[in-house]
Amino acid sequence: MRKVLVLNTTYEPLNVCSVRRALVLLLKDKAEVLERSGAAFRSERASHQLPSVIRLRTYVVVPRHRSAARISRRAVFARDRHLCHYCGSGRHLTVDHVVPRSKGGTDTWDNLVTSCAPCNRKKGDRPAHAVGLRLARKPRPPQPGDLVSLHVDHIHESWRPYLSFAT
């Protein structure tokens, strides 16, 4: 089933929904179409272009305590775009604690990164700099568009301008 990117009135990514849900929002005039998929939905009396990206007409308040977002392997991988934080590889991915748990590290967004198995084995329970590894960027809580890939297998090209990692 096709998916549609839902944006807030401020163009902030909120969610991914089904085409059916997006059509309901459009027909109730609660959203507007920003990008069309090219396909059409036909009923007995009407034909509608299927949306790819919609924007809500009224602002939805999003809680800013994003650090409360549920931490899981899939969520860490999605935030890090399925790339190792140390070498950039996309193969044999694991989750690594920047400060190892044996040294008091916790399961927080600021301490978890995606790592390939070879880098994770090399690092072991030591700090990254002690074994010659460097973090590509400081880990952080996910941004609004980071977790969109949790809901879909493929990021549609029409979505890229609206997501934080589009660059």
Image (cartoon, rainbow, N blue to C red):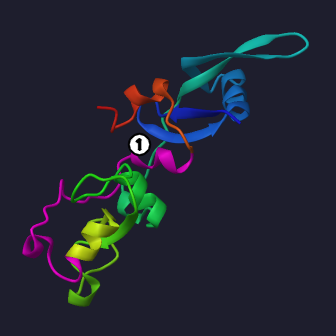
Q: Residues within 10 Å of mark 1 (few under 14, many from 20)?
A: many
Q: Give the left or right position of residue 34, taking residue 86 as reference.
A: right
**Residue 85 locus on image (x, y percent):** 25, 58
Q: Is residue 44 visible?
A: yes
Q: Give the residues in magenta.
A: 123-151
Q: Which residue is mark 1?
A: 145
Quadrant for residue 6, please give it.
Answer: top right
Does 123 appear above or below 77? below
* Quadrant position of the C terminus in the picture: top left
Badge 1 marks a residue whose secondary structure is loop
Total marks in image: 1
Nearest to the observer: residue 127 or residue 45: 127
Horizontal side of residue 18 vs 46, given as left or right: left
Closer to the camera, 142 or 127? 127
> Residue 36 in the image: x percent, y percent?
58, 17
Residue 65 appears in the figure = no
Is 32 displayed left or right of 100 in the figure? right
Q: Is residue 97 magenta?
A: no
